[in-house]
Every structure is written in structure tokens, then in C-alpha cells.
Image (cartoon, rainbow, N blue to C red):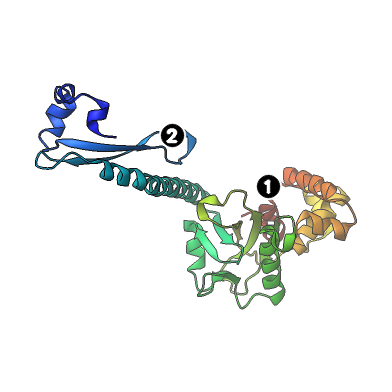
Amino acid sequence: MLDRQILDRRDFERTEFYQDWARPQGMNTGAFGFFLPDRPAKHRGWGVLMLVRDSRSDVFDQGEQQRLEALLPHVRRAVSAGLQLGSAMSERDALAAALDRLAPRGALLVNAQGRVVFANAAAETLLARSDAPIGRTRDGTLTVSARAPSAVRADLVRLLARAAGKDGQSAEGGTVHIPVENLTARSIVLEVLPFADARPFGSTLVLVMIDRAQEPPQDPPLTIKALQARWDLTPAEARTALLLAKRGTGSKMLARELGVSPTTVRTHLQRVLEKTDTHSRAALVALLLHGPV
């Protein structure tokens, strides 16, 4: 559409737009294309592509107007892609900022292949330590220290796969305790959780929360009776808590070993969390294995 089709030329030259901006810029005539880009609902609006010529040039002819019309779908797609990318980057930055606020707890986002795609500041500090119980390989894959038992490494791989819903499994979280032999380092408990919305990162992700605890010089033996006496747990609650600390698995695995339903396991663990004043399974395991942090 030409400017002359929108407003009579004499009327256009009387406008503030022409007098204060178009005329000082030497703009004499223009062709406009309007389009509606795909963008988040809260940012709906029209897009405009405007081409202008100065007084030394001719008015846009019919062929030029047709070429502008043919160009509009490509401009629309480019603008839509830019808006969607900007929205995704904003969501990613907001998520990263939220995970950073979890400090001193470490937080990792790991993709379905086990590679770390994001680590908050606390997790980066831990991963940078040469004596840390976890680390990253050269390709960014999350791994455990070579000093850790091989079974722990296998547990972590299994938990990551299960939380990512691999092999058609329903996504389920769990915990794994990673001990250390070096007394200058701190052993950790990883809480592996399915991540609901990974769109800002473009792939299936798993959230790994890191709880660290200092090894006490001497740990009293962890028994059902000891747990009952310390936190007034029922025998069933103590058995469930003890198995969680030793196996670090999700509700379904615990249920199979205890011979009860996953719902019963979740009920027992919720009561244990309340009685021990902890707020996650990882924090509970850290408390049971190492005492208050």
C-alpha cells in the first residue's frame, strides 16, 4: 500500500509526522506492508514494513508493490522467529536466576543424554573442585568421582534415565548418596527430579539438586530402633526412611522392596519429613547419614 492510498498527499503534508520527521529526513513517498507476527499473546500487535524514497525518486510502481507483497511472508516469519527466540531467552534467563537463588544448594539441569546444560553458582563452585565427589567429563556429561563405588555411578545413570522418562518409562525422581574418602571434601546427596517445562532449553531436562553434608568423625549405626528413638517414628516409617537412606531410590522401587504400594511409601515419607523437620528427600537422606548440617 502506498502513502497516497492511506491519506491524500496535501493532507499528509500538513501532518506533524511529515513536517517534523519525514520532510527533514528527505522522505517523499513510501510503500507500506502490514503483517501480524506470531508472538506471545500478551505481546500481540501488528508489524509494519515501510520503504521510503526521496524527492529525486519516482513513486513505487505496480511491479515494486507486488515484490513488496511477496516479501512480506518472509519478513513475518523472520520477525516471528525473533520474537519467539527472545521470549525463550527471557524465560531461560529468569529460570537461571531462580536456580541461582537456591544457594547454598547446588542445582543442575541435565539433558536426556546426561550432559549438564546449566549449573547455578553453587554447583559450578563444587564442580570446579578437584576433590569434589561429582564432576563433568570433557563433553559435559555429569559423572561421579573415580574414587566413588561403581554402584554409585550406575545408580546415578539409572536415576537420570528414569527422571528423563527414557525407554518409555514414566518420569520419576530419586536420590543417590555419593560418599568421599578425602576428609577435606564433603560428601553429597543428589536429588534427581523430572523437570516439567524445559522449553527455554529446547530439550528434555532433569533437575539435580545437591545437598552437601560434612562427614562426622563417628556415625552411630543407622538402625530402625535408632530412628524410632530419635524422631519418634513408627516401625513402618523407620523402615521406609532407612531403606531410602541406603538405596536412594524413588517411591516405586522402595514400594517393591517393602512390599507395599507407592502411595503408602509416599505417606510414610511425608510423615518422616514432618517429624524430622526436613523439606525434601535429599535433605532427609543427608540428615540420616550425616546428622544436622
Q: Amino acid at mark 1?
A: Thr
Residue at 21% over, 37% down: 30
Relative to residue 288, is residue 101 drawn left or right?
Answer: left
Q: Residue furthest right?
A: 259
> Can residue 103 be seen in the rendering of this structure?
no
Residue plotted at (43% across, 35% down): 43
> Looking at the picture, how far across and down is residue 165, in whole percent?
69, 58
Q: Is residue 110 left or right of residue 177?
A: left
Kindly report the distance in space between the C-alpha atoms of the residues bearing marks 1 and 2: 45 Å
State the residue in front, 172 or 244: 172
- Depth order, front residue of 121/193: 193
**219 above or below 55?**
below
Q: Which mark is residue 278?
A: 1
Q: Is residue 136 above or below residue 3?
A: below
Q: Secondary structure at mark 2?
A: loop
| Dot 1 or dot 2, earlier in sequence | 2
Quadrant location of the N terminus? top left
- Residue type at mark 2 is Arg
Q: x, y percentage for residue 246?
A: 76, 63
User: For the point 67% across and 72% down, which residue is it?
Assistant: 153
Q: Which residue is mark 2?
A: 44
- Near mark 1 (Cα within 10 A), the count class, few <14, some 14-19 or many ≥20, is some
Left or right placement of residue 225 versus residue 26 in this view: right
Q: In the depicted view, which residue is nearer to us: 263 or 104?
A: 263
Task: In the rendered structure, find residue 89 and report the number of the disc placed on it.
Answer: none
Query: Percent from the top left, x then y, of residue 29?
Result: 18, 36
